[in-house]
Image (cartoon, rainbow, N blue to C red):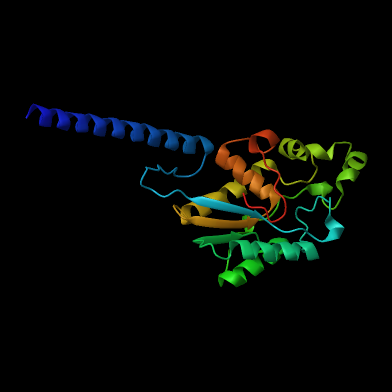
Amino acid sequence: HRREKQLHRNRADHHADTLTHWGGLAAGVAEIGDRRGLKQPRIMYVREQPTRLHLVRHGEVDEAYHQVFGGSIDMELSATGHEQAKSLARFLQSRNFDHIYRSPMVRVRQTAKPLLDALGREAEVIDELREVDFGVWTGHKWHEIQGKFGVDAENWLVHLENGDVAEAEPMDGYRSRIRGSLEQMMGEGAGQDVLVLCHGGVIRMLLALLLDEPFSDRKSTRLNSSHTSIS
């Protein structure tokens, strides 16, 4: 009887410790969600499935736009970009995605088509997933920025975030629209596999929001997404 009572006490203590541990973790997750400003932060317990976001950048664009601040220009893929899209389709066609979202821009639509055809699926188009607008830099090559505007294009992230680029999309507005897209995708795809086909700048902002890091901090996001890369 003594051993049985001790066994019950040990089990009760273990159960209490477990509840305390996961209760504290849940509170921490809720606090992080509040700090990031995401609506209705979810508390994830050990038995819940995580939401898996697969972020894909579009394929290579037409050669005329290489090393160009394209942004809002609705350019098409190059021949190489179309081949990259086919390779992407072969790589992902055996995966089962619960939700597929894409940007409305042509380069993303063309990247998504081979995969969607292989899957027999359609993607939900979210207008807010379009690339950031570079304002007066749009259409200019990287090496032209210093001579035309007196700033170093290599620091484009900082210039965008500081509002240094005339007529560019305000960073608060950009962050807000990408946040809205993220909330929609996380809400509709909670606990599921979600595929998102979009742009390099959009992927950077999505990760900045998820990781609670500055958009302009290259080191914190550790991201240099190449064409058709998966983050």
Whether residue 15 is situated above or below residue 179 in the rendered picture: above
Viewer can see residue 78 = no
Q: Residue furthest left?
A: 1
Q: Residue at 77%, 48% (x, y): give it.
A: 134
Whether residue 116 is situated above or below residue 129 in the rendered picture: below
Whether residue 161 is situated above or below residue 139 in the rendered picture: above
Viewer can see residue 31 = yes
Q: Position of residue 135 (x, y in %)?
A: 79, 48
Q: Position of residue 59 (x, y in %)?
A: 72, 59
Q: Residue at 63%, 52% (x, y): give it.
A: 230
Q: Position of residue 52 (x, y in %)?
A: 51, 51
Whether residue 3 is situated above or below residue 211 in the rendered picture: above
185 lies left or right of 68: left
Total count of labels: 0
Q: Which picture quadrant has residue 160?
A: top right
Q: Residue at 34%, 34% (x, y): give it.
A: 23
Q: Residue at 74%, 65% (x, y): give it.
A: 83
Q: Identify which residue, 119 or 155, lies in the foreground.
A: 119
119 lies left or right of 217: left
